[in-house]
Image (cartoon, rainbow, N blue to C red):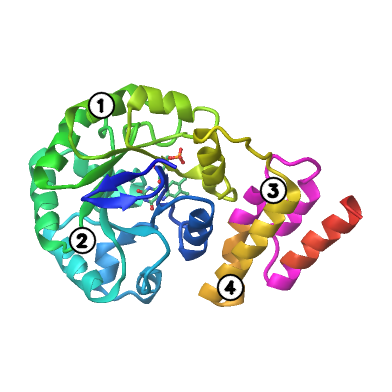
Amino acid sequence: MKSFKIAGIEIKSKYVGAPLAGYSSLPMRKLDFSYGSYLNYTEMTSCNALNYHNSKTDAMLPLEKEEGLLALQLFGSDLETVIKAIKYIESKAVYDFLDFNLGCPAKKVLKQGSGSYLLQDKDYLYKLMRNIVITSSKPVICKMRLGFNSIEGVEIASILEQAGVQAICVHGRTTKELFMGEVHYDEIRKIKDRVSIPVIANGNIGINNIEQVEQITNADAFMIGREAIGYPKIFEDLINKEEGREIRKKNFLEQEECFKKHIELACKEKDELGACILLRGVAAAYFKGLENMKELRMKLVTCSSKEEYYSALNEYKKKNFI
Ligand SMILES: Cc1cc2nc3c(=O)[nH]c(=O)nc-3n(C[C@H](O)[C@H](O)[C@H](O)COP(=O)(O)O)c2cc1C
C-alpha cells in the first residue's frame, strides 16, 4: 500500500476520508479507517460557534486519540475569531492536523465571509492563513476549490504554500460549479506541478476513474467524499485495485454487517434516538445499487431505534435469504 507524507508525518494510505458535514463524525471515520483510509477529516466546525462554547459544536470535537490520523477542520473568516478558536481547540481537542476550509459553497457559509468566499481576496487570504500557521501548534492544511467564479487554482495554491500551509486538498471545481459537472483534473495537475507541498486530489473520484485521475493529476493522495457515504469499503476496493487484487462486489450481507457496526458506533457516541434519526440519511445509502431494495430502503428511512433497524433488516433477510 502506497503512503505519502505531510509535514514529515507518514500517512499510510493515499486514500483519504473527506470532511462531510452530517456524516464524517467518529462512526464514519472509524469505519473508513477499518477499510483502509488512514487520514480522515472531521465535519467542518465553526470558529464562531466554538468561541460561544456552543454545546452542539463542542460535542463535535474529538476528545480522544483516534486510530489513524485526524484533520480537524475549521471554518471562519474574521482573523481574531479564528485565532481564538484555534487556541480553544488546542486546549480541548485531540487531532493531528488543523485543516482550514476554503471550499464550502453553501450560502449560509459564504454569507459569513467564510469557506470559498475567502478565495476572492488574496491579500486577506495570505494574512489569515499566515496567522493560522503561526498560531497552530499542529501542521496546517487547507481544503480549497479552484477559485470562486473563475479558475485561479495555481495562484491560490501558491499563496497557501507561501503562508506555510503544509498540504492542500483541491476539489477540482470553482464555487460557482458547486458539486456538479466535470472536475478539472488538469487544473489540479497544474497546481501539483507548481507547489512543492503534497496535493490531495478531490472531486468525483471512485473505483472506475482512480487510475485516470492519478495519471492526469499526479497527486500525492486522493480524497473520497460521497462515494464513501454508506460504502466505507470503497477504501478497501481502491487499495485492492492499486495492488492488483480482485475487488469483491458490493453485496447485501457485507453491507448489512457494516451498517450494523455503524449503528452500534453511532449509538455509543450519542443518545439512541438522536443517533438513529441521523442514521436514516446513511441507511438508504448502504443498500443503494443492490437488487430488490426499494421496500427495505423505504423502511430504513423511518426507523427511530436500533430495534427498528434490526427488525427491518431481519424481515428483509427472512423474505430473501431463508
Ligand atoms: C453532504 C456533504 C457535506 C460536506 N461537508 C463538507 C465539509 O464539512 N467540509 C468540506 O471541506 N467539504 C465538505 N463537503 C465537500 C466534500 O468534502 C468533497 O469536497 C465533495 O463532496 C467532492 O468530493 P466527492 O465527489 O468525492 O464527494 C461536503 C460534501 C457533501 C456532499
Q: CA distance from mark 3 to mark 4?
A: 20 Å
Q: Which of the labelled discs sits on residue 287, or is there none?
A: 3
Q: Are marks 3 and 1 in contact (CB under 8 Å)?
A: no
Q: What amino acid type should be assigned to the residue bearing mark 3?
A: Phe
N-terminal-most mark, 1 or 4: 1
Q: Which of the labelled discs sits on residue 267, or is there none?
A: 4
Of circles 3 and 2, the one toward us is: 2
Residue, disc 2: 138
Q: Are marks 3 and 4 in contact (CB under 8 Å)?
A: no
The percent coordinates of residue 100 (x first, y second) are 25, 52
User: Callout 2: helix, strand or loop?
Assistant: loop
| Magenta-colored stretch includes residue 52 | no
Residue, disc 1: 151
User: Callout 4: helix, strand or loop?
Assistant: helix
Q: CA distance from mark 4 to mark 2?
A: 31 Å
Residue at x 89%, y 58% (from the top left corner):
318
Of circles 3 and 1, the one toward us is: 3
Residue at x 55%, y 29% (from the top left corner):
208
